Image (cartoon, rainbow, N blue to C red):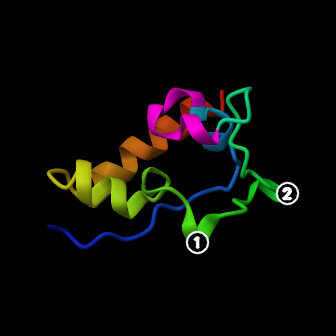
């Protein structure tokens, strides 16, 4: 498996505003699709103990390790851009 390096997150918070699209995060939805742990400045209040599905390295290694990290980040960037529109 290729060594994972972090995705360059812009910290816009939009992925945390659409958690209703991720069934594994339904318990974190505050009722409007926004994560109840999204804090000021779009920072996660539980970042160090966030769910695995919110961790890019975990997602890559467990679901997308058949891709290169670069291709995984291209896919993440595309999803990120779609959420910002």
Which mark lies nearer to you, 2 or 1?
1
Q: Which of 41 and 74 is in front in this view?
A: 41
The image quadrant of residue 32 is top right
Q: Position of residue 28 (x, y in %)?
A: 63, 42
Counting residues from the start of the chain, the first of labels 2 and 1 encountered is 2
Query: Which segment is the magenta one?
Result: 20-28
Which residue was labeled with disc 1? Answer: 48
Residue placed at 71% from the left, 49% from the top? 12
Viewer-side residue, 55 vs 80: 55
Name the residue located 55 percent from the left edge and 29 percent from the top edge: 82
Which residue sits at x=50%, y=56%?
A: 51
User: How dense is the environment of label 1, judged by Cα within 10 Å: few (below 14), some, or many (20 and up)?
Assistant: few
User: Residue 74 vs residue 22: left or right?
Assistant: left
Q: Name the spot of residue 54 as percent of width and height, x first.
A: 50, 53
Is 26 magenta? The answer is yes
The tag on residue 40 is: 2
> Under tag 1, what secondary structure?
helix
Image position of 74 with respect to 44: above or below? above
Q: Which residue lies furthest to the right in this view?
A: 40
CA separation in Å, label 2 and label 1: 16 Å
Residue 12: mark in rendering: none
Quarter of the view holding residue 15: top right
Any magenta on residue 30? no
Q: Main secondary structure of the magenta part?
A: helix
């Amino acid at each position: 498996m290729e060594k994972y390096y972090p995705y360059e997150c812009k910290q816009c918070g939009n992925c945390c505003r659409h958690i209703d699209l991720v069934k594994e995060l339904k318990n974190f939805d505050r009722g409007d699709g926004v994560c109840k742990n999204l804090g000021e400045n779009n920072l996660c209040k539980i970042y160090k103990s966030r769910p695995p599905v919110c961790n890019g390295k975990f997602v890559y290694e467990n679901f997308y390790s058949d891709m290169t990290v670069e291709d995984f980040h291209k896919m993440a960037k595309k999803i990120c851009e779609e959420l910002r529109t």
